[in-house]
């Protein structure tokens, strides 16, 4: 049974301290070490907090590589794996890059175990889909080099700012800035957007 | 300033805002993500079963050891195993020569009585045959009913104890396995 089919909700861990969905990504939080220590000590609320902080980043990294329909399940697997293997994390401050690497590995596993599929023709795929424009943009992003695609998804889809992306993924701000601008330039070309 | 909007959302950039609006349909929605009711319970459950499996292995090893000891002890007792020097041998005075000189000597174990026409070579072969396999062919007399020794009683008690522990463990596991 896939883990996605199990019942329950991660929000159970979160407790009463709510962090809004829209603000989760924009909060610059630096209590990674304390959070990890609390989780390893058995505090499940701490895992809920960690989830709220890093879920958009994990989701974005996955979404840059797989179709939207698959991203949620893989993100769920990432957090399950993280919970089970948290004791193997050597440096608590590196929790963000660690989650990112788990997400990338899970995507590789996803493609390894998935069967080859045949894409629908334009006639079917474009039939009255409310997400037609979004699908086209996402397809254009997927065609970009993965470093650009990942950064653009985190910025345009998940709504994270450049500094937040740098902080959570462990990349340098300069790298993120370069990826954003070069990726955006390529995306504009692909979509025919003039500056 | 366009560059600032792409980097830290300061200023405006209509093209990027349009892209953001279009792609917001794919944005992470935490309500869409579900995780098992308690991941921790799963992990703890696995640890518990791992501990149980170790317990089972240890109990099984103990049972096997006790049972084999209980079975081996009476067999290996000093009364049942013949000492090597007690193996069948011809009496000292009955050498091959003496056998050759007594053609009508009764040969008991596994050797037919010799006919007068047989030569000394036949006797030699017959005696060799009689000497070699006899130790294996001799049937042990059925052991007479004897009272249990202290060691046997101890082994029996240990076996019963081990079986009761195993039974308890099995019941415990049966209770813990969901759906059983």
Image: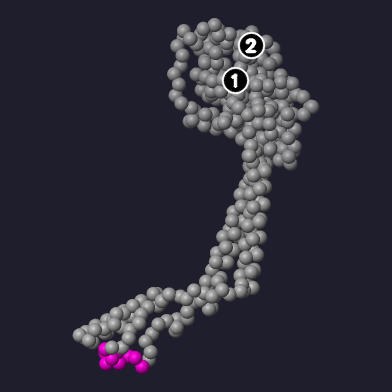
Say whether residue A190 is left or right of residue B42.
left
User: Residue B133 versus residue A37: which sits nearer the camera?
Assistant: B133
Say whether residue A43 is left or right of residue A169.
right
Where's the C terminus of chain B, which quadrant?
top right
Q: Residues within 10 Å of mark 2 (few under 14, many from 20)?
A: few
What residue is pinned by disc 2?
A: B21
Estimate the spatial distance between the alpha carbons at disc 1 and disc 2, rounded to whole Å: 13 Å
Q: Choose top left, top right, bottom left or bottom right for residue A178.
A: top right
- The chain to which mark 2 is attached is B
- Establish if A121 lies above or below A147: above
Q: Residues within 10 Å of mark 1 (few under 14, many from 20)?
A: many
Say whether residue B91 is left or right of residue B121.
right
x, y percentage for residue B42?
A: 65, 38
x, y percentage for residue B126?
A: 28, 81
Q: Are marks 1 and 2 on the same chain?
A: no
- Establish if B14 lies above or below B87: above
x, y percentage for residue B2?
A: 64, 12
Q: Residue at x 64, y 37 (%)?
A: B179
Q: Choose top left, top right, bottom left or bottom right for residue B36.
A: top right
Element type at mark 1: helix
Label disc, if present, on residue A153 of the rendered structure = 1
User: Residue A48 versus residue A96: which sits nearer the camera?
Assistant: A48
Farthest top residue? A128
Q: Residue at x 65, y 65 (%)?
A: B157
The span picked out in magenta is: B93-103
Whether residue A54 can be seen here: no
Say whether residue A89 is left or right of residue A20.
left
Residue B8 falls within the magenta-colored stretch: no
Q: Residue at x 44, y 18 (%)?
A: A118
- The chain to which mark 1 is attached is A
Whether residue A112 can be seen here: yes
């Amino acid at each position: 049974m896939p883990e996605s089919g199990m019942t329950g909700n991660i929000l159970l861990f979160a407790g009463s301290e709510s962090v809004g969905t829209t603000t989760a990504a924009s909060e610059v939080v630096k209590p990674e070490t304390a959070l990890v220590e609390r989780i390893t000590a058995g505090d499940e609320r701490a895992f809920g907090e960690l989830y709220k902080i890093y879920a958009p980043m994990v989701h974005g990294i996955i979404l840059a590589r797989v179709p939207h329909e698959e991203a949620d399940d893989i993100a769920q697997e990432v957090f399950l794996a993280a919970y089970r293997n948290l004791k193997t994390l050597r440096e608590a401050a590196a929790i963000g890059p660690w989650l990112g690497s788990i997400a990338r590995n899970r995507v590789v596993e996803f493609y390894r175990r998935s069967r080859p599929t045949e894409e629908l023709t334009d006639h079917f795929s474009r039939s009255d889909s409310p997400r037609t424009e979004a699908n086209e943009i996402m397809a254009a992003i997927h065609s970009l080099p993965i470093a650009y695609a990942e950064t653009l998804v985190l910025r345009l889809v998940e709504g994270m700012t450049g500094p937040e992306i740098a902080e959570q993924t462990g990349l340098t701000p300069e790298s993120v800035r370069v990826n954003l601008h070069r990726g955006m330039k390529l995306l504009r070309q692909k979509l025919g957007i003039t500056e | 300033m366009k560059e600032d909007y792409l980097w830290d959302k300061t200023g405006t950039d209509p093209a990027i805002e349009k892209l953001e609006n279009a792609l917001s349909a794919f944005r992470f929605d935490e309500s869409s993500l579900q995780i098992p009711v308690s991941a921790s319970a799963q992990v703890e459950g696995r640890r518990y079963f791992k501990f149980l499996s170790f317990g089972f292995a240890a109990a099984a090893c103990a049972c096997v050891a006790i049972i084999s000891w209980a079975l081996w002890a009476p067999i290996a007792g000093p009364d049942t195993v013949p000492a090597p020097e007690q193996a069948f041998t011809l009496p000292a005075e009955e050498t091959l020569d003496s056998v050759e000189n007594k053609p009508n000597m009764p040969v008991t174990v596994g050797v037919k009585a010799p006919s007068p026409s047989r030569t000394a070579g036949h006797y030699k072969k017959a005696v060799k045959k009689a000497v070699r396999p006899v130790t294996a062919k001799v049937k042990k007399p059925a052991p007479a009913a004897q009272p249990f020794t202290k060691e046997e009683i101890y082994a029996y008690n240990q076996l019963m104890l081990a079986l009761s522990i195993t039974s308890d463990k099995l019941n415990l596991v049966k209770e813990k396995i969901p759906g059983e």
